């Protein structure tokens, strides 16, 4: 199983990757340039990028499903690196503000429910994470 690169500090990367200045470059690509693929790291030798690809992942979550609901919410199903799944739901919240002049201002806001574990005891009707057990 590949290791998640972001699990390691800059110092830990420098201990693992030689020469150590390459670890700084990798860290810069991940945390400052937001690289999502090792091929984007063009200042690294191709052989090093291939080796990194074999050992590490930059994307521990894989989007499996995106489902839009009639109420404006959107569900996301993510697969973790170990094959388990977690869910996130983007919920549309409509809010009405009543003003003294009788006018009404309609606002759309969003809130996010993120499953931070595999399985959950709560059992929200809109979420399938509880079906994974706890």
Image: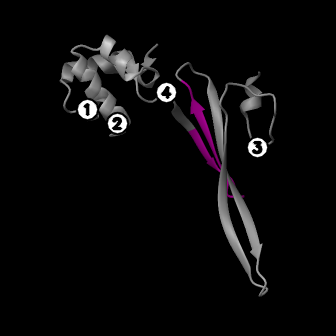
Which of the two labelled residues, at mark 4 and mark 1, occupies the earlier sequence position? 1
Residue depth check, mark 3 versus mark 4: number of the one nearer the observer: 4
In the image as oriented, which residue stretches furthest toward the bottom? Answer: 101
* 121, above or below 105, in the image: above
Q: Earlier in the sequence, mark 1 or mark 2?
A: 2
> Residue at coordinates 41% horizontally, 28% vertically from top-left?
58
Q: CA distance from mark 4 to mark 1?
A: 18 Å
Q: CA distance from mark 3 to mark 4?
A: 24 Å
Report the span colored magenta.
65-80
Furthest toward the front, the residue is: 11
Magenta residue check for 69: yes
Q: Are the residues flagged by discs 1 and 2 in contact, CB closer than 8 Å?
A: yes
Element at label 2: loop
Q: Earlier in the sequence, mark 3 or mark 4?
A: 4
Q: Position of residue 63 (x, y in %)?
A: 53, 36
User: What residue sits right under mark 3 in the picture?
Assistant: 126
State which quadrant residue 39 falls in.
top left
Q: Are marks 4 and 1 in contact (CB under 8 Å)?
A: no
Left-right relation of 108 to 10: right
User: Earlier along the polypeptide chain: callout 1 or callout 3?
Assistant: 1
Provide the residue designation for mark 1: 41
Mark 2, residue position: 35
Name the secondary structure under disc 3. Answer: loop
Taking 98 as reference, is 91 above or below it? above
Q: Main secondary structure of the magenta part?
A: strand
Left or right of 4 on screen, residue 17: left
Q: Residues within 10 Å of mark 2 (few under 14, many from 20)?
A: some
């Amino acid at each position: 199983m590949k290791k998640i690169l972001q699990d390691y500090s800059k110092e830990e990367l420098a201990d693992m990757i030689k020469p150590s200045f390459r670890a700084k470059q990798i860290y810069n690509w991940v945390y400052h340039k937001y690289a999502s693929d090792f091929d984007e790291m063009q200042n690294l030798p191709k052989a090093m990028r291939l080796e990194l690809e074999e050992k590490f992942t930059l994307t521990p979550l894989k989007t499996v499903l995106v489902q839009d609901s009639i109420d404006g919410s959107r569900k996301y199903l993510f697969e973790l690196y170990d094959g388990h799944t977690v869910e996130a739901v983007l919920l549309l919240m409509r809010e009405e503000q009543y003003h003294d002049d009788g006018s009404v201002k309609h606002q759309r806001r969003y809130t996010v429910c993120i499953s931070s574990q595999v399985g959950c005891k709560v059992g929200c009707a809109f979420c399938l994470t509880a079906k994974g057990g706890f």
